[in-house]
Amino acid sequence: MKLWVTLEGREAEVTFRTEGDRLVVEADGRHIEADFVRLPDGEVYSLLIAGRSHVVRVSPTAEGLEVEVRGTVIPVEVKHPLEKMLQAVSGGQTTARGETVTAPMPGVVVAIRVKPGDAVKAGQAVVVVEAMKMQNELAVSHDGVVREVLVSERAAVAAGQPLVRVGPA
Amino acid sequence: MKLWVTLEGREAEVTFRTEGDRLVVEADGRHIEADFVRLPDGEVYSLLIAGRSHVVRVSPTAEGLEVEVRGTVIPVEVKHPLEKMLQAVSGGQTTARGETVTAPMPGVVVAIRVKPGDAVKAGQAVVVVEAMKMQNELAVSHDGVVREVLVSERAAVAAGQPLVRVGPA
Amino acid sequence: MPRLHRVLIANRGEIAVRILRTLRETERTSIAIFSEPDRTALHVLMADEAYPVGAGPSRESYLNMERVLETAKRVRADAIHPGYGFFAENEAFARACAAAGIVFIGPSPETIAALGDKLAARKAALAAGVPVVPGSDGPVGSRDEVKKLARTIGYPLMLKAAAGGGGKGMRVLKNDGELDAAWDLTRGEAKAAFGDDRVFVERFIERPRHVEAQILADATGRVAFLGERECSVQRRHQKLLEETPSPAFDAKTRAAFGEAACRVAKQVGYRSAGTVEFILDEQRQFYFLEVNTRLQVEHPVTEMVTGLDLVAEQLRVAEGNELSFGDTPPEPRGWSMEARIIAEDPSRNFLPSVGVIERVQFPQGPGVRNDSGIYRGYEVPVFYDSLLSKLVVWGADRDQARRRLVRALDEFVLEGPHHNLAFHAWLALHPEFAAGNLSTRFLEDHWRPGELKAGPEAANAALLAAALHERAERQRVQVGGRENGASAASAWKWAGRERGRR
Amino acid sequence: MPRLHRVLIANRGEIAVRILRTLRETERTSIAIFSEPDRTALHVLMADEAYPVGAGPSRESYLNMERVLETAKRVRADAIHPGYGFFAENEAFARACAAAGIVFIGPSPETIAALGDKLAARKAALAAGVPVVPGSDGPVGSRDEVKKLARTIGYPLMLKAAAGGGGKGMRVLKNDGELDAAWDLTRGEAKAAFGDDRVFVERFIERPRHVEAQILADATGRVAFLGERECSVQRRHQKLLEETPSPAFDAKTRAAFGEAACRVAKQVGYRSAGTVEFILDEQRQFYFLEVNTRLQVEHPVTEMVTGLDLVAEQLRVAEGNELSFGDTPPEPRGWSMEARIIAEDPSRNFLPSVGVIERVQFPQGPGVRNDSGIYRGYEVPVFYDSLLSKLVVWGADRDQARRRLVRALDEFVLEGPHHNLAFHAWLALHPEFAAGNLSTRFLEDHWRPGELKAGPEAANAALLAAALHERAERQRVQVGGRENGASAASAWKWAGRERGRR
């Protein structure tokens, strides 16, 4: 089976097959073999790669997978051939699309730092949400212009609720 | 709902109902109320009985239930009205039926102490099975006469495998 | 004073569990209270008795003084242990307990009052001849007042909530400009956290160490010093890792330090367990900061090296008995560290995280202790703070303790909310940490986003895991399952946001 | 001697996990080996490296000397730690390691040989002027020989496998009649367990205490005594609960005891960690029993009171270094107890149990240590012994340790195989145990089937749980689901059998 896997910023074309409890992977030139077994509790695999023992925990997230290896969480982006092709077509200039700042968790809006029309720089805090007794400054990830402010101060917000929409600069 | 519950040798007629997170039980004259919630992992209930906190774990077994309360396992026999009636009809002289001694776990038969026709007394060891590096003497629970010996010495046996059949005395 | 048979714990989470363990070990009845969302919290499940006290928000339950006291009276509690936070340092609550004929396990209301206000505490320290950090003598009423003060003391200054503690409601000011930004935010936090928006300022020491003294005083006024704890590794004034002894101390410093701490305690007629907080400047001169009139989150490291049970000692004092060790506390043995395991995402600026504990396996084996309020399947509520567990280790010396911490973190399995296990592993392996070169600016100096990159071997394992996941999913995955390329692409863009939602 | 970087653990289960924890903490590479059914065992998952050594039965894997050594050589192991059992006390294996240029972590092959044979060990003790229990001077060849001996020493006698240990292959004889019954069974067990059916006899002391000395000797022949362990609570000569210090000892006895243990060790030029076992008669006179030339299952209690890591000390000695404490071992502090958590059913005459660990929550908090080889979802294999976990507690004194054990047992959740948690709770709460009145006959004297009856409050809770279960099952349960009344009735009869199957 063939996949495109993006891991720590690098994308690689990956082909793999399994023979019984052996896993054979080819990724940009490298050949990796492992003895694998799925453990009983959760999506957890025990891998023996040339004798080295690894327990890896896989949890799907909205943008792909998170794989935990010895406490470190490694985000992994997996794409299938067609998906890959479509993305190529769409050009994937992701940063030109603008973004929406959402509440990362339930809380209360204690400050709004921008108004529609304001220009914002990547990393600039636009909203302050208080949750778990901490005030959290929520920032935009790209330069842009504020299109909408969707909440008011003191408003209680739910996890994932859109707070501010920002369009391309 | 009505049940017959046998607990530590005593059988009681039990009626119960739930109202939201309240459980109301009547058992031979006694009235017990509890606040209950099922916990997320396994069949485990948190009970607050007049403020006293109990975590009870329920696991079904062949003969009924095992309820674990603070580390102590309490076997509980539950019967439904019809079942109860049928048992009444059948008289339930269970000891007259004879029994079969089975291997409680995988192991090797290291000794057979009886042959067909032998009279055996309750508690008498009839077979020795070695498992987990221990020799375990398996006894009959009632007086009787050996009908069949189903294995030979040195035989490897599986859990639950019948070893000796004993008929009524 | 009769034995305290029935003790109500006016708290929740790991500290409530910690306290009820000692109650059980001393054969007392443990009585828990719980808010609605805490019906299935671990302290409720483990207690002998448990009673509801209201809705989720603390103010409606754990901080609902009438309800808590009414419950304590109704269930005939002999005493109340407040834990930390909530009513732990609340004078009015302590008085109300006394009025209700219930023993408050802690110092007297007068002591709490005298030390609860940071400014009064400063005065007490000065009266006891213990040095304090230069600053405003009282609350400051306006930005301008602060600016005036800045001319004399000089920037950087620290703006602090008068009623504050636990690092909440504090901000550093490098200049007048930062003051303007921080003024409202700090007073807002102070108001929200303590219902008191008074703030004051003091000189900000660039690279201070935070070192505190554990004291234990009996009813007769005998005060014992149980060694120091260094809590320098902090983020936003929130302690992350504590240890005892302090790598900055020699025997001479320790003696002077303990002596100063006891002087402050005697000055205010202290009783029960308490913590005298100091900061050390770069010259290792210590200045009095404040007294926490409660059991501290990090008290276990002191227990690990002394073998004492501080909660048991508090109970002894509350019963009017002398301390278990009389006049001579046990010699500390070895070294202990505590890592606070918090529901937050180090890779996203430590954003708090919530959710269900999907899987948890605590590290075990020699020299490891877990104090925790979570279990598999438990949903971490949003109403309370995000401390999930405390991983405490002991070693014969600092390096064994540190390596044991690394080993234990490596064993720790925690799935569900994001957490800071990997951060602690980074910290414990950092050469400056290993060398004991600590300060409260450790993170500003050494932590950079992206520090948690996995090595090539882990990356390989992750690659293989991804392949195995796809194999497992093969049936369910339809190629291009996301409606179109654009939204597949947008998954990228949203990645940041999404991860926060878990 | 160079540092041992790569250490292969020729063992499995909790002790393999225990050893690899120290390897990780001392920054060495841990190399596990595993049988086919152990591919998912905890020691394999936790090790840095893991290699297969054959099929399930020990003889085909963990006891397959060629395969294990070939593996150690192939993966370039610097040393092998044997743990306990398997090759731990196997002279030939130790020699083969040396021949292969691999360090065997333990005493020399000569020492193992000298002490492995109980009769040779008796001679060594006598030579060192240490008293032994009167008995046969060598193996006994026939029933008649034993009967002759019985005339001089007198019944009761103990029939023991010459190559025995760990309580396997031992039987008590009260008279000639019992001898006839026990002779074949004992030699059968001896053959099965040790491949050697030689047996010998010694005087059986009616109510002995089992007390053993932990010793640690460096390469230069310096021998340290690290305190005693009392292991009197046993069933069928299988230790169930161990503690240190012994409630039977005063300082004077301890000094004489330690001195005797060191004499035996010096007599045979002992090296590394070892245990000198004694029995105490009713007059508290101690007699040498045997030397276990290995790390003991119950070594953690010694670690709890001394703060030492015995595996780390073994590594130091194997590297030719002196002990971490030089000449003066640390003063023991407090009291420690270890409860062996075993897959067996106390309510069915401790019948061994197997199965999947459906749920496990280890007790946590102050003074609690778990050394375990299990995890949720793990299936306990039938090939190896049934020790699931060791619950170790520490207290400032015996009573705190005992009450902490009770508390920890109460917290312990273990679902799947039957286990002896409730038995240990019964034991820890028994007045005779609390009083320290122990002997190896403790169970014969005090344990009766049915001791584990739950109290009325627990019975009520169980009743309610049954009701809630029925409610949950309401849909699935068809009334009379069992085909007919007869088989419903027979469910009763079969109950006993069935429970064994879980």
Image (spheres, coloured by chain):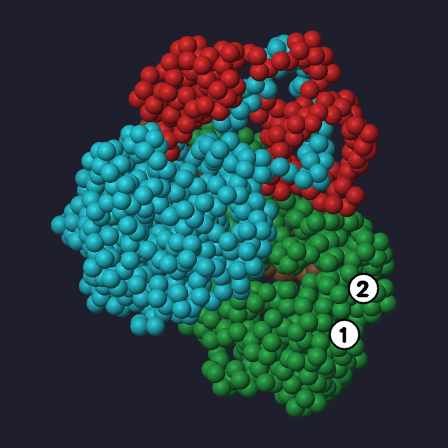
Chain colours: A red, B brown, C cyan, D green
Q: Of residues D476 and D57, which is closer to you in this image?
A: D57
The first of marks 2 and 1 along the sequence is 2
SS class, disc 2: loop
Q: Spatial distance from mark 2 to mark 1, Cα to Cα?
A: 13 Å
Q: How many marks?
A: 2
List x then y, in percent, for residue D320: 72, 72
Q: Of residues C412 and C132, which is closer to you in this image?
A: C132
List x then y, in percent, for residue A61: 57, 25
Residue D470 seen in the figure:
no
The residue that label 1 is drawn on is D108
The residue that label 2 is drawn on is D102
Q: Farthest residue toward the left?
A: C99
Quadrant in the rendering for residue C450: top right
Quarter placement of the C terminus of chain B: bottom right
Quadrant in the rendering for residue C106: bottom left
Q: Farthest residue toward the front?
A: C151
Badge 2 crowding class, 10 Å Cα cut-off, few under 14, some 14 to 19, many 20 or more, is: many
> Residue at 40% across / 29% down in the picture?
A136
**Residue type for callout 1:** Ser
> Residue at 54% across / 30% down in the picture?
D481
Q: Of residues D31 and D461, which is closer to you in this image?
A: D31
Residue A115 seen in the figure:
yes
SS class, disc 1: loop
> Residue at 16% across / 47% down in the picture?
C96
Question: Mark on residue C389?
Answer: none
Quarter placement of the N terminus of chain B: top left
> Residue at 34% across / 23% down in the picture?
A111
**Residue type for callout 2:** Ile
